[in-house]
Image (cartoon, rainbow, N blue to C red):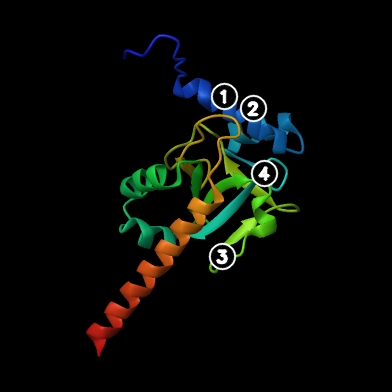
Amino acid sequence: METEPGVLVHSRRSRDVGAETWLMLAARDASVARQEWDEYGVALLRCGTIFSAVRIPADIVHAAAGTAGRGAVADYLRTALEGPCFFDGNSQAYYALTPHSTARRWNVPDTECLGADFFLGVPATTISEPDPRCAAWWVAPMEGPAALCDPGIVRWLVQRGRIRRSEAAAEEAGKDA
């Protein structure tokens, strides 16, 4: 891979380590969180300190993406969000990480923004597909420390998904009539 002179290229692993180190700032105890990531693949991190997390139901994301296929949804989210997002199979929701201040202003139907006083099970930065240790994995990994989703883009994605979901429901209702 050729790059322009003076352009610094970081490996996926160095970006993961940088993101992991930054995420540890949200842990009550970083050594415990690292141990949880190693053992369970997920660690509880406090929202509202360095990041907030917008919880988006899977059906809205799938409607926005036009598919429920795991790989296609991941491709869509990496392009659309331009920031980190993980899926949690237990809650059947996607979590887009946004700046910590997002929760104070978030008011988007069918979603919730987790801010201060919320703890969230965040997968290890190296988990990008289903893992037997946990039900969560990154579909759009962090590109580095503090590289978060723009709340406006997350809002747009949710609105797009809600509209497409409504259109699909109306189309189904029309077929049944």
Give, as a three-letter code, the residue at label 1: Val
Which residue type does callout 2 highlight? Thr
Q: CA distance from mark 4 to mark 1?
A: 18 Å
The front one of 93 and 18 is: 18
Q: Quadrant of residue 144?
A: top right
Q: Position of residue 12 (x, y in %)?
A: 45, 24
Density class for disc 1 (Cα within 10 Å; few <14, some 14-19, many ≥20) is some
Labels 3 and 4: the sequence-earlier one: 4
Q: In terms of secondary structure, where does tag 4 sit?
A: strand
Q: Which quadrant does the C terminus fall into?
A: bottom left
Task: Identify residue for label 2.
Answer: 21
**Front of the two marks 3 and 4:** 3
Q: Are marks 1 and 2 in contact (CB under 8 Å)?
A: yes
Q: Quadrant of residue 112?
A: bottom right
Q: State the separation of the CA atoms marked 1 and 3.
A: 32 Å
Residue beneath label 3, please? 108
x and y percentages locating residue 100 in the rendered image: 67, 46
The image's mark for residue 44 is 4
Residue 163's image quarter? bottom left
Task: Say which residue appears at 70% left-offset and 57% top-offset.
Answer: 104
